[in-house]
Amino acid sequence: SQELSEDAHIDYHAALLALQEHGTRMVCTGKMHTDRICRFDYLCYCSEAEEFVFFYSNSSVMLPNLGPRRFQPALLDLSSVEDHNTQYFNFLELPAGALKFMPKPVFVPDVTLILNRFNPDNLMHVFHDDLLPAFYTMKQYLDLDDEARLVFMEGWGEGPYFDLYRLLSSKQPLLKEQLRNFGKLMCFTKSYVGLSKMTTWYQYGFVQPQGPKANILVSGNEVRQFAKAMMEKMNITGPEAAAKEAEGAEEEKGKEKEKREDYIVVFSRSTTRLILNEAELIMALAQEFQMRVLTVSLEEQSFASIVQVISGASMLFSMHGAQLVTSLFLPRGAAVVELFPYAVNPEQYTPYKTLASLPGMDLQYVSWRNTMEENTVPHPDRPWDQGGIVHLEKEEQERIQTSKDVPRHLCCRNPEWLYRIYQDTLVDIPSLLEVLKESLKTRPNLKRSKAASTVHPGRVREPQCRTSVQATNEAKLTVSWQIPWNLKFLKVREVKYEVWIQEQGENTYMPYILPQQNYTFSENIKPFTTYLVWVRCIFNKSLLGPFADVLMCRT
Ligand code: UDP
């Protein structure tokens, strides 16, 4: 218990008294267990029982007070994966009086974030499920600062990427197994339980086949700010930092920046899902793009050195796999090229495509798929979790081996999926270059790619309509408006206005896109009719503003 008590500047007796008198206090956000994060004073953990404990007293608080609904199915998700039944959090209740009969509690003075890592052995899961959600949960609660303590309750060991979790705060994260070292009863003075799901973009297929989340709430901006913060913690000066440095400095440094060479990175896997002709691929890419080609692999380099290389790359090539999550460190304008083994449909496995396509990520994404059976090397004899199928019935093995496409399936043990995804691939260079030619809209270019503006227009102002009747079957409707208030502060490439005209009582409308701030409609406008008119502003074709209040226009 040395580490905790050393920086324990709290008065033990005061803390014990507070716990006995006030008990535990909990106040949560969120309506459902799937969107809930709870803040506690004096949440305790009993390592013998492996249970969190809420101590009742006259002044304890429990909001929401769900009664037995707290178990239907749980108070909250402890990981960022939605509603996974192995990741639920709950606590036991005890009267504060029971403390008299319990071992003396050890108090944790740090503000603590308690969570489950979902799969700390897999780099995609590490970033997507744990690091990004923890990073932004900590941004949400000000006292979860650099001094915060993280506690991982999933029960796994440190795992291969523990150093990445260490970057989240200056204090060493605690694992569930370490909690018992601190005594039988630990009480967290101040803690937050649960993770924000705001930054996740992918669902892994537990209830429906995997795919992008239905309602993605994160943009490239937040992913890139996270990446920047991680790089700073790893002491990596990315190309942006280097460029900034050069800007202010003397001319020579500026020239150096100009000379900074474009290069391609091939992320190679050394144990499974191999590219069998990696050397040939590298030569072909160097030849085709006239760029240097570097290879990186998790087996051979430190993670920081990989990030350093990727953060300056123009293109990243890799077989489908968790290592591709590192594309979040690519500079804007770079291309991600994901290679898929034989019989695997790239459309159905899109965690990295979704990442690259987040608005504001500004990455190009290209997938290539091996369609030549003679170029694939399956491994039927391996263990089931590396795609082996010899444990299956002969008929099933045959079916799998002759199938040309893995049908849609749920996570995580579908043998046909595992068999196909763990194949090694001889990449057919001509077909890959063909796909690149077709799909790369522009040559990946880092120098020209500034962050595109994401500012949305405000409402158009002072919308008005005037009408006139020309003849018994002819009328005119003139609509005018003023520019949105924020436009005068912005440099916008293209400003357009959208006008919807609906005849009252009809359930369809006519949409128009206009470059100017007024227009007289005469086609399809009838006399003595009421029209409802909506007007909004659009920047650069895709940034839609809100509609102004509807106009009622009677001809
Ligand atoms: N991995 C690796 N080299 C390999 C195989 C795997 O670095 O040859 C890493 C991979 O990036 C991931 C972890 O090991 O972080 C687990 O790999 P697995 O194939 O199980 O998962 P996937 O990459 O398909 O998500």
Image (cartoon, rainbow, N blue to C red):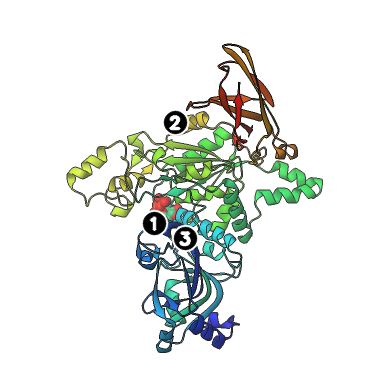
In front: 353, or 498?
498
Residue 103 picture quarter: bottom left
Residue 285 screen position, x and y as percent: 53, 37
**Label number found at residue 36:** 3
- Label whose residue precedes the other's in the sequence (3 or 2): 3
Q: Is residue 369 left or right of residue 289?
A: left
Q: Are marks 2 and 1 in contact (CB under 8 Å)?
A: no
Q: Quadrant of residue 372?
A: top left
Residue 320 vertical position relative to residue 525 in the rendered view, above or below: below
Q: Amino acid at mark 3?
A: Arg
Q: CA distance from mark 2 to mark 1?
A: 41 Å
Measuring from the top left, give residue 293's x and y in whole percent.
Answer: 56, 42
Query: 494 above or below 142?
Result: above
Q: Which mark is residue 431?
A: 2
Mark 1 against mark 3, which lies toward the viewer? 3
Query: What is the distance, in whole Å, between disc 3 and disc 2 at their CAs?
Result: 48 Å
Count residues near mark 2 (Cα–Cα under 10 Å), then give few for <14, some for 14-19, many for 20+.
some
